[in-house]
Image: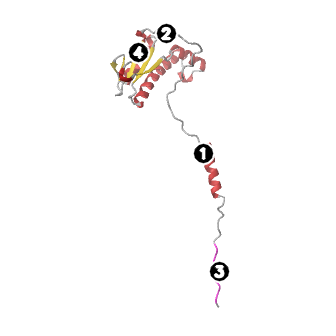
Amino acid sequence: MFRKRYRQQIPELNTTSTADISFMLLIFFLVTSSMDTDKGLLRQMAPPPVEQQQPQDVNKDLVMRVELDGKDQLTCDGKPVDLRQLAEAVMAKAVVNRTEHVISIQADREASYEAYFRMQNTIVNAYQTLREHYAEQRYGKSYAHCNADERSVVNDYYPQRISEMPIQEGGAR
């Protein structure tokens, strides 16, 4: 009258290949996912000169000097300015002297990157605003909707003429 009790056995799951599958999925997702790249200034450096060029003399009246000091204070031609005033000054200089003007940027090594990039973006946005207005006026459409030839004409009409130089140690230029 003793009954034998049979223990119910729980079926086991074969997990020998689970680690391999997990590793393969990890590699798959790493390879197929895109990583954010560092963002910076969208600048294209001038190609190196093929032959030695002589430095050109520039009329000082056509140069706008923009300086960023170690305390993140902006000056334009020796006068303190904010970003809005800087944009207006750049647009005014570019409208009056379209192809001869030069925006000379000097930044102190102690200036913060944030202030430097805000200044750079303000100058670039001022040029973009001028180009946008000219594209609307000439082609009746925004700069973004212009084809490559039209953009080239607009860029030649309002060229970005920016020169950068760090302020030397001790404030000497």
Residue designated by label 1 = 30
> Residue lying farthest front?
169
Nearer the N terminus, badge 1 or badge 3? 3
Relative height, residue 7 to residue 149 (above, below)? below
Could you tell me residue 30's position as x and y percent? Answer: 60, 45
Name the colouring of the figure. secondary structure
For the residues labelled 1 and 2, the Cα–Cα distance comes to 51 Å
Q: Describe the element under mark 1 as helix, strand or loop.
A: helix
Nearest the camera: 170 or 148?
A: 170
Q: Which segment did they paint magenta?
A: 2-9
Q: Residues within 10 Å of mark 3 (few under 14, many from 20)?
A: few
Residue 3 among magenta residues: yes
Of the two numbered discs 3 and 2 on the same chain, state the one appearing first in sequence: 3
- Name the residue at 57% across, 17% down: 152
For disc 4, the neighbor class at 10 Å (few under 14, some 14 to 19, many from 20) is: some
What is the distance, in whole Å, between disc 1 and disc 3 at their CAs? 49 Å
Count the numbered circles shown: 4
Disc 3 from disc 2: Cα separation = 100 Å
Q: Mark number for residue 64?
A: 4
Disc 3 element: loop
